[in-house]
């Protein structure tokens, strides 16, 4: 069965695929191999604006050429070579461009944590740590570097558009795509994605932000109808997108599969026209998620510019609607203009796609450094970490295939593992949809290399008793556990899952508990995308959250274990005590008619959209820590939490209002090691604002030598202190008393000062 048809959520209607060939296209002959021709024409005058240049092209375009820009020609990765996709780079999407006028095609690849589909194309891609790990760094430079690596590798492979930039906030931590997103806070997630997009687009690659909006669960994602009030929407999920769009300036936004307050996102006038294009002044284009378009006239009027991956709705049907006068010339031209102007603005026309060699050595260092900054030290008692290589005589390394590899996140984000798949499928090469892929980055080897005086023994961790034996015999036990997640599914729970090893059911919680009770110097390492519950939390001396570590995750971990790197990551998501504490104790599942997994729907039903089922986001703005704060629920590890091998002192808070609020304080490294601290600033709004107890309004990541002190000053964006006033359709500052709190986690805020804002 073909990949595209197997992908539950993407299930591009067979009809759409057969219709792909129906579009007549002007001059198909672009380059296939080598570099593309240089475009010529009056629009190549770079002293004109992107908008002016787009209009010059548009004046020369036929109706067919315009329509051809409004849709893709299928998924070249999975499909045979056709005249339409022949010039493509064989990624997941391709728009033919305007070959007659020298306007290149738009060649798209998924690129969440690295460039996808490299295996099937015989190419190399670096896997960065999962996006959630980058968020855990709270380092805006790391986010930029993350995007820049993706941009350069896309360009080197011959692509000119990235499908990355996932920024749906973690409202539902069991969402199978939590690893692809940037955490639960809109200011953190939005700020980080803006940097990521800027990095990507610095390589003259079109960047995109997705999945707009409220694609916060994968269960029934193609049919679910999310309901949420406007103010809560604007202050939560939409704020992350607002920051991403207005600060990152992505050339494109991908609308999501789900419905929001009744309409599919890709035909949702409120989301696309009112908010994105009007309020945020987004000048770029909106493309649908793969198979997420469900109409022609309605979607076009609502602001969808481009259908992907095929042209069920935006091909012949669109042309007929224009010819019949049901879609105006002006509306058509607006869509075309947005696509062309974005191509000029992103530089894909002035700097044509140019294949080159990826520098895997340099990029591996970037990936490792981001992982080193993203690793979060959750617990560290009795100085369990860092390990002292000179003293250690024996180490037991246990579980989760830590002898050979580290797990990665699945779905359309999946990067094919350079070096082959460490566990399955054997033989390496291209990955398949929803297979668990283990990158061949071996924690065992990384530990051995750093502890030359120690005997390092591996135990697969399949049997709690055997694992305990191995742990008891060693100075230190390092036990690995994992939670795999993927697009197209949600996690059944936040518990570490059981897995099969050589026919045996492995209970990871039992293995950890057994190891920790056998050896007081036990270090637990988690490879997860989402928070996990920890019934054994009191037992081990140390707990390390490594996320999905990417191509060089093991060396990053090794550097943290042995103190070459002092951990500085902070949680971008709250770890709750139990699912019962979540706003929704269970993930609502679709009824049979609304399921995309059973394949019952006909292509026509698919295209038109499966019947809706309701999910109400009644918690509103109370996402993540805002929920636990407001509901006074204790948590396992709070948002913003993470330890270091040194300690930090906060003092001298000053809050000044000179037009904008500036928060200043002194941060000191009070320990014996150099380290970076993420100093977090929260604000409590006046009671009359009726907001949750506090919200993140800024932060600063500061590197300090032992004993060093620095004065830190952060200017607060007034929007982050405001509420969304639905009547005024804008952000408003509520007059009254604002309390600013500063510290190292959302629940450790030693500095506090209030001011009154007019
Ligand atoms: C995913 C998108 C992805 C697209 C193309 C969809 O199923 O939701 O994130 O970019 O497929 O692979």
Image: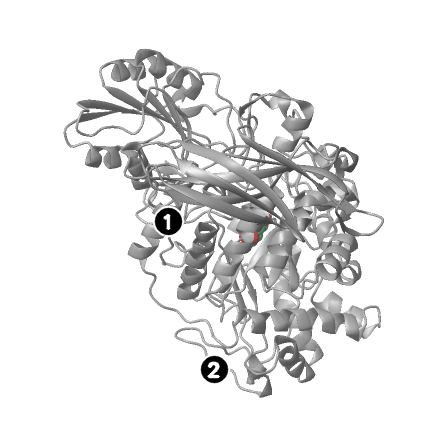
Which residue is denoted by mark 2 in the rendering?
Answer: 38
**Observer-nearest of 465 and 706:** 706
Q: Which residue is most to the bottom?
A: 42
Q: Mark 1 points at which residue?
A: 367
Instruction: Kindly tell me whether residue 76 is visible in this rendering.
Output: no
Residue visible at 49% across and 70% down? 86
Under circle 2, the secondary element is loop
At which x and y percent is residue 188?
56, 44
**Can you tell which mark lies on residue 479?**
none
Q: Tell me how far mark 2 sits from mark 1, CA to CA.
A: 34 Å
Q: In this view, does 535 lie above or below 697?
A: above
Q: Tell me if mark 2 has few (under 14), some (14-19) or many (20+) residues whose alpha carbon lies within 10 angstroms of its own.
A: few
Image side of residue 654 versus residue 456, left or right: right
> Who's the residue at 70% across and 58% down the image?
280
Is disc 2 in contact with disc 1, using a CB cutoff of under 8 Å? no
Residue 184 pos. (x, y %): 59, 38
Residue 511's place in the image compared with 49, above or below, is above
Residue 751: image quadrant is: top right
Mark 2 or mark 1: which comes first in sequence?
A: 2
Which secondary structure lies at badge 1?
Answer: helix
Q: Residue at x 74, y 58 (%)?
A: 279
Residue 377 location (% of width, % of height): 41, 31
- Could you say which quadrant of the image residue 544 lies in? top left
Badge 1: residue crowd in 10 Å (few <14, some 14–19, many ≥20): many
Q: Where is residue 310 in the image (x, y as percent from the top left)?
A: 62, 61
Q: Residue 612 is drawn in which quadrant? A: top right
Residue 262 in view: yes
């Amino acid at each position: 069965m073909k990949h595209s048809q197997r992908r539950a959520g993407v299930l591009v209607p067979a009809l759409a695929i057969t219709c792909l060939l129906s579009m007549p296209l002007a001059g198909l002959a672009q380059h296939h191999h080598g570099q593309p021709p240089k475009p010529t024409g009056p629009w190549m005058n770079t002293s004109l604006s992107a908008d002016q240049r787009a209009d010059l092209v548009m004046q020369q375009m036929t109706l067919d050429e315009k329509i051809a820009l409004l849709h893709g020609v299928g998924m070249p990765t999975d499909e045979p070579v056709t005249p339409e996709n022949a010039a493509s780079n064989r990624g997941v999407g391709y728009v033919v461009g305007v070959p007659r006028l020298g306007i290149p095609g738009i060649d798209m690849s998924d690129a969440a944590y690295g460039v996808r589909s490299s295996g099937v194309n015989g190419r190399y891609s670096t896997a960065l740590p999962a996006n959630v790990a980058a968020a855990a760094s709270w380092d805006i430079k790391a986010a930029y570097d993350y995007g820049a690596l993706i941009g350069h590798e896309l360009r080197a492979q011959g692509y000119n558009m990235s499908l990355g930039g996932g920024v749906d906030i973690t409202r539902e931590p069991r969402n199978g795509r939590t690893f692809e997103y940037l955490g639960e806070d809109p200011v953190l997630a939005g700020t980080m994605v803006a940097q990521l997009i800027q990095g990507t687009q610095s390589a003259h690659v079109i960047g995109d932000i997705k999945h707009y909006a409220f694609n916060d669960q994968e269960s029934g994602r193609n049919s679910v109808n999310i309901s949420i009030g406007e103010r809560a929407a604007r202050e939560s999920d939409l704020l992350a997108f607002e920051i991403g769009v207005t600060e990152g300036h992505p050339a494109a936004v991908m609308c999501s599969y789900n419905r929001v307050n009744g309409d599919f996102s890709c035909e949702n006038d409120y989301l696309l026209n009112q908010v994105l294009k009007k309020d945020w002044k987004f000048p770029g284009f909106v493309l649908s998620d793969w198979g997420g378009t469900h109409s022609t006239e309605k979607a076009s009027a609502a602001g969808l510019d481009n259908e992907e991956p095929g042209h069920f709705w935006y091909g012949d049907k669109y042309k007929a609607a224009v010819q019949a006068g049901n879609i105006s010339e002006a509306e058509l031209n607006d869509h075309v203009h947005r696509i062309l102007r974005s191509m000029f603005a992103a530089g894909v026309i002035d700097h044509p796609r140019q294949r080159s060699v990826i520098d895997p050595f340099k990029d591996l260092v970037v990936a490792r450094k981001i992982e080193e900054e993203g690793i979060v030290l959750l617990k560290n008692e009795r100085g369990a970490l860092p390990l002292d290589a000179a003293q250690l005589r024996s180490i037991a390394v246990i579980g989760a295939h830590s002898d050979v590899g580290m797990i990665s996140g699945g779905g359309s984000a999946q990067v094919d593992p350079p070096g082959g798949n460490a566990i399955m499928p054997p033989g390496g090469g291209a990955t398949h949809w929803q297979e668990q892929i283990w990158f061949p980055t071996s924690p065992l080897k990384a530990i051995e290399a750093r502890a030359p005086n120690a005997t390092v023994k591996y135990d697969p961790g399949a049997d709690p008793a055997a694992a305990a034996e191995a742990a008891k015999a060693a100075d230190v036990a390092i036990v690995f556990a994992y939670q795999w997640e993927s697009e197209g599914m949600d996690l059944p729970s936040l518990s570490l899952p059981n897995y099969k090893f050589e026919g045996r059911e492995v209970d990871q919680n039992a293995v950890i508990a057994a190891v920790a009770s056998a050896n007081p110097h036990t270090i637990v390492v988690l490879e997860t995308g989402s928070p996990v519950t920890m019934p054994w939390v009191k037992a081990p001396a140390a707990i390390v959250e490594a996320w999905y570590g990417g191509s060089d995750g093991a060396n990053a971990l090794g550097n943290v274990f042995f103190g070459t790197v002092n951990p500085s990551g902070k949680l971008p998501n709250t770890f709750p005590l139990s699912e019962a504490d979540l706003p929704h104790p269970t993930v609502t599942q679709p009824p049979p008619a609304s399921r995309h997994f059973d394949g019952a729907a006909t292509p026509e039903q698919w295209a038109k959209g499966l019947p809706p089922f309701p999910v109400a986001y009644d918690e509103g703005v109370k996402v993540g820590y805002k929920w636990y704060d407001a509901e006074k629920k204790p948590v396992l590890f709070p948002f913003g939490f993470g330890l270091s091998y040194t300690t930090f002192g906060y003092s001298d808070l000053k809050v000044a209002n000179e037009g904008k609020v500036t928060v200043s304080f002194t941060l000191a490294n009070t320990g014996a090691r150099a380290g970076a601290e993420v100093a977090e600033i929260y604000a409590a709004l006046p009671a009359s604002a009726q907001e949750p107890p506090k919200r993140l309004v800024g932060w600063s990541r500061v590197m300090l030598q032992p004993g060093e002190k620095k004065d830190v000053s952060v200017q607060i964006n007034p929007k982050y202190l405001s509420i969304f006033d639905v009547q005024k359709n804008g952000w408003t500052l509520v007059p009254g008393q604002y309390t600013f709190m500063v510290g190292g986690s959302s629940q450790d805020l030693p500095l506090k000062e209030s001011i009154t804002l007019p």
